[in-house]
Image (cartoon, helix red, strand yellow):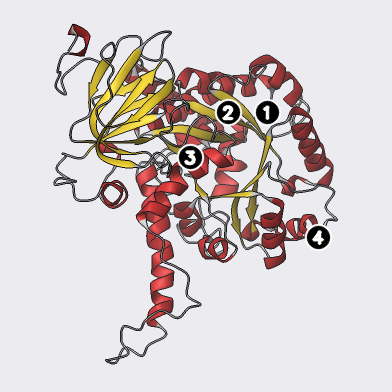
Amino acid sequence: MSSRQREQGHDQEPPSDSGGRGRRYVIRGGAVMSMDPEVGDFEVADVLVEENKIIEVGPDIDAPDADVIDARGRIVMPGFVDTHHHQFETAQRALLANGLLLDDGSGSPSAHPNYGEHILNGFTRVYRPQDVYINELFAGLSQLDAGVTTVLDVSQIHHSPEHTDAAIQALIDTGRRAAFGFFEGDGRAGYRYPEDAHRIRDQWFSSDDQLVSMVMGGELHLGREVYTRSWAIARELDVKIAAHAVGSWGMRPVFDEVARGVGGVQVGPDNIFIHMTGMSDQTWERFRDAGAQVSLAVPIEMVMRHGTPPILKMQELGMEPSLSSDVETTMAPDPFTLMRSAMTMQRMVVNQMVLDQGDLVPPNNYPTPAESVPELVTVRDVLRYATINGAEHLGLDGRSGTLTPGKQADIVLLDATALNTAPLNSVPGSVVSLMDRSNVETVIVAGKVRKWRGRLLGADLGRLRRELEASRDYLFKALDMRQDLFAYS
């Protein structure tokens, strides 16, 4: 064993210049869950990383010239992918813990404040470029700390090119993989959506070989003149198109028109639709047949009255979702919350369907499921939703989503020796049913170690928190909304 590869414990330093030219390290001795059926899973194995790529996955890798990351007692798996996160709203965290999507006229604490009035038509309109930057950066670092190595940032804050550039710069400075979503702004003087996409692509995304890529926001509820232009520009630039689909917002009629072929645009595999709650069977079938993808934000859909998350509809059509966090105004954005919410929601509905086939009187109290009953979602399923499905939906599956030789090294190490998980009896079961962000010990993006042994690297979190607090104070004052730590609950 070379001096570089001497045995080290969990108090070791991270490999020097990780992700850099010519740098090699091996993640040794962990329980490896590759999420790639052809690579497989290993109770004990290694992952060899060279520069930004995975070179080999398997037991006892011979790499005498490589540094070593001791992964004993750790689960080694791909980084998580969040396919829809409004990162610019971080300053309003938990403000809408009760809040609905819209005011339902009930006069309840859930109706006021609400998302439509107080966020989209409220705080969003008073953001300055510097507010965009710190909110985006802080949200990105927080998710990176939780093991989310890739995000689609749905930043509906593009009031001006300066707002747009601040959002992109924050994504770059976060140092994780991201798809920048160029969505609408508030239409003020200097507003350039969607035409500014050409400048954005030329200035920020001239190369496809970078951590941050581009997605076009193509919201159908903005009206045909706008969405036909945005979709046409996206296809001219060869970027994905993302759009919300929420029946309770009143979006169903225009989606039905598009599905019938009279909406002025054609759906294709470059489309990713968010939520898909309250949509007609015809729309679902047409979008499925066109190869469109669907991102579900299950906790938000359940809490904010978007509609029941359509997991069962997707199962019926042979589709699978990716998972997304949506808004931190209302719910935590970590992948464990997303996976558990998706699994428990689907199993609650299906389990009740099965119980309803009996009569609660023995021997019919626990009936065998009828053939028509959907399969129960498993921990493996939701892990797939949260990793490879997310990468596929963002067009990044050639780079990330699995631990596959040749892909870039987006990897998380999860502590399975912690108080909330030991002893380890099931790798996928522990990740989904037991773990939380405290188990995320090490995070690697494109070969570069970004979090090490529980500590985020290269970020002055104290200073950034103070800047975020200053942004929050400005936004509340600009909106003339009272700050009260107990008022909105």
**Who comes first in sequence, dot 1 or dot 2?**
2
Residue 379's image quarter? bottom left
Q: Quadrant of the N terminus?
A: top left
Evaluate whether residue 190 shows in this view: no
Kindly identify the residue that appears in the image at 82 percent across and 46 percent down: 224
Task: Tell me whether circle 1 and circle 2 mark residues in contact (CB < 8 Å).
Answer: yes
Kindly identify the residue that appears in the image at 82 percent across and 37 percent down: 229
**Who comes first in sequence, dot 2 or dot 3?**
3
Amino acid type of the residue tagged 2 in the rendering: Tyr
Q: CA distance from mark 4 to mark 1?
A: 33 Å
Quick one: 243 or 48, which is closer to the camera? 48
- Image location (x, y in percent) of residue 102: 58, 55
Evaluate whether residue 77 shows in this view: yes
The residue singled out by tag 2 in the image is: 127
Quick one: 26 or 73, which is closer to the camera? 26
Amino acid type of the residue tagged 4 in the rendering: Arg
Which element carries disc 2, helix, strand or loop?
loop
**Who comes first in sequence, dot 4 or dot 1?**
1
Which element carries disc 4, helix, strand or loop?
helix
- Image location (x, y in percent) of residue 143: 40, 33
Which element carries disc 3, helix, strand or loop?
strand
Q: CA distance from mark 3 to mark 4?
A: 30 Å
Residue 437's image quarter? top left
Numbered label attached to residue 82: 3
- Image location (x, y in percent) of residue 113: 50, 50
Amino acid type of the residue tagged 3 in the rendering: Asp
Quick one: 188 or 487, which is closer to the camera? 188
Between circles 3 and 1, the one closer to the viewer is: 3
